[in-house]
Amino acid sequence: VPLAEDKIEGPETRLTFLGIEIDSERQIASLPSTKLSKIKDELRKWSSKKAATRRELEKLLGLLNFACKVIPQGRCFLRRMFDTLSIANKKHHFIRLNVGFRSDLAWWST
């Protein structure tokens, strides 16, 4: 089986696997800086929104849900966001962002 040289990493104590940086020396998992900056940019955009489509909300929740792989306590700050998502049935329907959603968004922004 031929190996793709650009896909081979190691041996190293820090590598990225499935979008998560793993450091075996310090025993930590973290988000790569590119993913972290993407999440911060999205949160800045969402801080001023009053309403959004279901599709936009799904995209944001997908990013934050991925971040929960390394921020497990973040999962409980997605609950009200998912509750807000359930209001709309179709992807193009607009959803008004309520106080609970904004509170959870504020937690993620800190």
Image: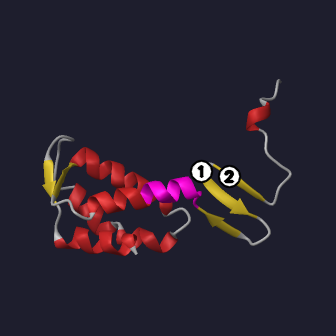
Give amino acid for label 1: Gly
Residue 38 falls left or right of residue 45: right
| Colour setting | secondary structure
SS of the residue under disc 2: strand
Q: Which mark is residue 16?
A: 2
In the displayed structure image, the side of residue 107 where residue 16 appears, left or right: right
Q: Is residue 46 visible?
A: yes
List the single residue furthest toward the right.
11
User: Helix, strand, or loop for circle 1?
Assistant: loop
Q: Is residue 76 left or right of residue 99?
A: right
User: In the image, is residue 93 above or below residue 3?
Assistant: below
x, y percent for residue 36: 50, 59
Q: Magenta span covers which residues?
A: 31-39
- Splitting the image into 4 quarters, where does residue 12 fall? bottom right
| Location of the N terminus (image quadrant) | top right
Q: Which residue: 68% across, 52% down?
A: 16
Q: Give the CA distance from mark 2 to mark 1.
A: 6 Å
Q: Is residue 24 left or right of residue 11?
A: left
Give x and y (percent) for residue 37: 48, 58
Q: Kindly identify the amino acid type of the residue bearing the numbered disc 2.
A: Thr
Marks 2 & 1, CB-CB < 8 Å contact = yes
Would you identify the image quadrant in which residue 3 lies? top right
Q: Which residue is mark 1?
A: 19
Residue 29 colored in magenta in the image: no
* Vertical side of 96 occupied by 73: above or below: below
Expressed as whole percent of the image width and height from the top left, the position of residue 88 reads: 16, 50
Say which mark, if any, is on residue 51. Answer: none
